[in-house]
Image (tube, rainbow, N blue to C red):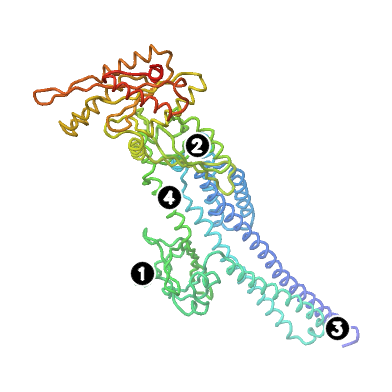
Amino acid sequence: MNFKTSAAYIVVLVSLLCGTLVWYGYTVIQQVTKIEDLWINFNHEATQASYDLSQINSNFGYGGFIHNFKNFILHQNDELIPIIDENLTLTYDAINDYKNLNISEEEIKALDKLAHIVDIYASKYTFAKRLVSEGNTPRQIEVHVQVNDKPALDAIDFLARFSVNRSMLKEKETDKALHSTIYFLNWGAISIPLIILVGIIIINFLKRLLDANIKIENAKKYSEELIESAPDAWLIIDKTGKIVRANTQAEKMFGYKREELESHTIELLIPERFRGGHGSLRDGYFKNPKFRPVDNRGRELLAVTKQGKEFPVEISLAYTHKDGEMQAVAATRDITKRKHVEERQRLTENVFKNAAEGIIILDYRLRILDTNDALSNLMGYSHEELIGHTPRILSFREASKPKFEEIRIALQQNGQWHGELWLKHKNSENLPVLISISEVRGEQEAHSHYVIIFSDITRQKQQEERLEQLAHYDSLTTLPNRMLFFDRFRGALARARRLQKQVGIFYIDLDGFKQINDTLGHESGDEVLIRAAEGLKHCIREDDTTARLGGDEFVILFNDLDDLQVVNMLAERIISNLSFSVPAGRNKLFITASIGISIYPRDGNNEELLLRNADNAMYQAKRKGKNNYYLHETINNS
């Protein structure tokens, strides 16, 4: 073989070797690039999907649109409208962003189902705003805008599970590509000349391969972090019920360490009384593996902690495969707080409904939003008759109107007012009530609501009137007593001084009363006093006062006297009305009256002097034969 041939063979061999090296190097580069592309695509889609799901959860779930929508119905606060609109817009944006990813048909169906529920909520929200503007109550609005959001929540849970499953599948795909590349590199390392020739290239490729491996490990770590950062407790379970994997939230929720959970079956977390039939239920789920919520046949799902505390949960199931074995992913959510909120709402409604006091809830325009049955029983109006009206429908009495300004100022300054008002029952009966008005404002509400509590104080007022009667009126004759008389006497003199008027004091003593009392007894004496009191009532005008000072002594206060002719006429009328007989067996005993009169300002300028002068004049009338009257001035002139 000559040089040229040998050279040719060498050239050919070198060319072949170089071509093989080039092919080998290109193939390795393609495979490494493929691994890198797999990682980049996986990282981009996983990050974007996780972000979109987070946006959907935060803007649509119970902390977002649904929560704010229900608060808007309950509190009817217009400040919630821009927040709800933003929640709705961000939810739609997140759904559309998710659809733009390279997703499966199942994910598209789940997103369409979620978008459908969001569309329903959007239309219900528009309708609710109209109902609120029309003044409907939360109870009335809720009837028209109820939405079954369970399909939407199921869709969100499905997307979360599917995202995890896809991450696992991408991890397997990347791992498979990495093993294929390593196998190809091992095949190329058989040729020592090629290793020598392409050593530097192999080192470079190995470095890139190492970088790819680091990225894969980072991808695995990222998947782990996704599982660990999930807001729900995640338990991965095999067909036998053994817990294969648990996240941090599961440790917190159930009180077990991870190694404790992963050494037991799922029955560890189920109350003992429910464990018996769980195996067959689990087998049924594995025979028909699909994303689903756990159905407890209408009963509340309960879990139990390490300390034995039971709590309500929601569980959603998804399925994945590892090493050829099917595994279930159980996402468990503690719904204790939600149950407490629901129970508190029910309790509040029951307290409102069954309260003994009447209750009215007003919006910021002072329109009636709601009333309870006690209010209807108290005021006679039905619930429907009051809704949408102001409290003026209860027809406040004129006597209460001066308090309106006091109430308005108190609400502006303190947000509350307590006091008494007179209302008018539907049947027009005046009703005294004790009212408590309190302002109720949410944390972010610009407008206030008001709660008015009504208590019927009719009995209290009647008791006060009885006490007033006992304190200021004579119990036998019902005439004003000494205390009330002097109170009115002082007022009459003050007015007379201001208006320059005369006031007459008529001091009256019954003639013959002692004989009747001693002969016929005290009961007959009381009857005489009552008859005398009735006679005196017919002798006075509306603004005059007749009082019993004690025993058989009476006094009359006449206001605005014009002249002595009026005084004489009044005295004669009193003597006439107090002249009557009392049967005493076959005989009769007679009652007459002796009257002493003093006039303000002629006979004195204070109560004591005027009354003393009238008393002296009365004794003069008795000394002159009784059954007559004397004026104090007449005494002085005689």
What numbered label is drawn on residue 10? 3
- For marks 4 and 1, give the CA distance: 33 Å
Secondary structure at numbered mark 2:
helix
- For marks 1 and 2, give the CA distance: 46 Å
The residue under the point 22% across, 31% down is 526
Q: Nearer the viewer, mark 4 or mark 1?
A: 4
**x%, y% of residue 145?**
47, 42
The residue under the point 51% across, 55% down is 153
Secondary structure at numbered mark 4:
helix
Earlier-in-chain disc, 3 versus 2: 3
Q: Nearer the viewer, mark 3 or mark 2?
A: 2
Q: Nearer the viewer, mark 1 or mark 2?
A: 2
- For marks 3 and 4, give the CA distance: 96 Å
Q: Are marks 1 and 2 in contact (CB under 8 Å)?
A: no
The single residue placed furthest to the right in the displayed view is 3
- For marks 3 and 1, give the CA distance: 81 Å
Which of the pair 8/357 is nearer the observer? 357
What numbered label is drawn on residue 348? 4
Task: Identify residue for label 2.
Answer: 131
Locate the C terminus by quadrant: top left
Mark 2 Cα-neighbour bin, 10 Å: few <14, some 14–19, many ≥20: many
Which of the pair 526/551 is nearer the observer? 551
Task: Identify residue for label 1.
Answer: 274
Q: Up-down: is 373 above or below 527?
A: below
